[in-house]
Image (cartoon, helix red, strand yellow):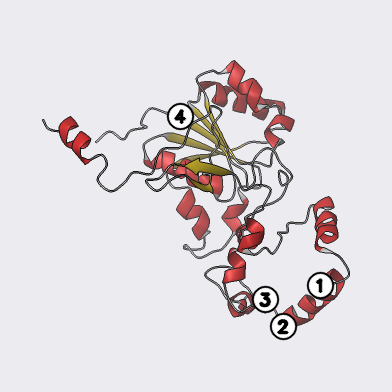
Amino acid sequence: MTRPLEGMLVISVEQAVAAPLCSCRLADAGARVIKIERPEGDFARGYDRAARGQSSYFVWLNRGKESVVLDFKKPDDHALLARLISRADVLVQNLTPGAMARAGFDLEELRGRHPRLVICSISGYGETGPYRDMKSYDMLIQAETGLASLTGPAEAPARVGASVTDIAAGLNDYTAILEALIAAEFAGYSRGTLGERLKSVGIAFGNFNTVEDFSHHPHLRRIAVDTPEGPVRLPAAPAVFEEHRPSGRVPALGAHTAAIRAEFAK
């Protein structure tokens, strides 16, 4: 059976989880996916050794792809990537915001040069806004969104699916000493000041928010959705489209039954 995306070429400049998951789904649908890796490889290759000595994350997210190692700083590699993109149907990338442009592949220019090219850029907080350059690992997002505040006891919140004991089990005997030293140092700063200092040196961090805190988060977008009982404001989906797409109405039970019966009567 022909898969829906057979014959399509996807170039994915990707690492970690988000873009690899996206391009994996495209590969599952039949697209030819060429994965562009840095010389040292996608760092997800080293996440663990659970899959016959390989990273279980990498095996899970990268089946059905072809791996090409390129160094954009080298003219020949840069030119090769340009040719690949020129022949592609889809470009996926999840480098840090602005990294593709700094490498000589400005996305707006690519759109102008290749009108048929579909470009999908993935980042933790989007290409604009105060969190644009923030790292967005799983635990940090759980802290930012207030989810961590609901998991575990109040004095020891933890990420969903793990307790403090689980985390500590993978560390050495100096965990308690290290945590005490860090806590003592951090206690001398306000949250805002500490966040600015960590951000200035590129250290990944997230604010420990409650659900109420998250309701005022600067990157939380909301949309109004009509329902049978009136409009409701909801968090918007993470995908951002260039053209405005009004949200669909939430249907009442059986609202479209008659129309569907008529449409598919024969």
From the viewer's side, name the closer residue of 254 and 148.
254
Q: Which residue is mark 1?
A: 182
Q: Report the front residue among 40 and 124.
A: 124
Looking at the rendered structure, the secondary structure element under dot 1 is helix
SS class of the residue under badge 2? Answer: loop
Q: Amino acid at mark 1?
A: Ile
Residue at the spot x=40%, y=40% of the render? 249
Q: Is residue 120 left or right of residue 177?
A: left
Residue found at the far left of this picture: 266
Q: In terms of sequence position, does the residue under pointer 2 or pointer 1 come before the other?
A: 2
Question: In the figure, 156 relative to 214: above or below?
Answer: below
Mark earlier in primary sequence (1, 4): 4
In the rendered image, which residue does mark 3 sit on?
171
Q: Which residue is mark 2?
A: 173
Comparing marks 1 and 4, which lies closer to the viewer? 1
Q: CA distance from mark 3 to mark 4?
A: 43 Å
- Quadrant (top left/top right/bottom left/bottom right) for the C terminus: top left
Instruction: Indicate the position of residue 58 as horizontal and vertical percent values.
Output: 52, 53
Tell me the amino acid under the disc marked 2. Asp
Q: Which residue is mark 4?
A: 9
Q: Secondary structure at mark 3?
A: loop
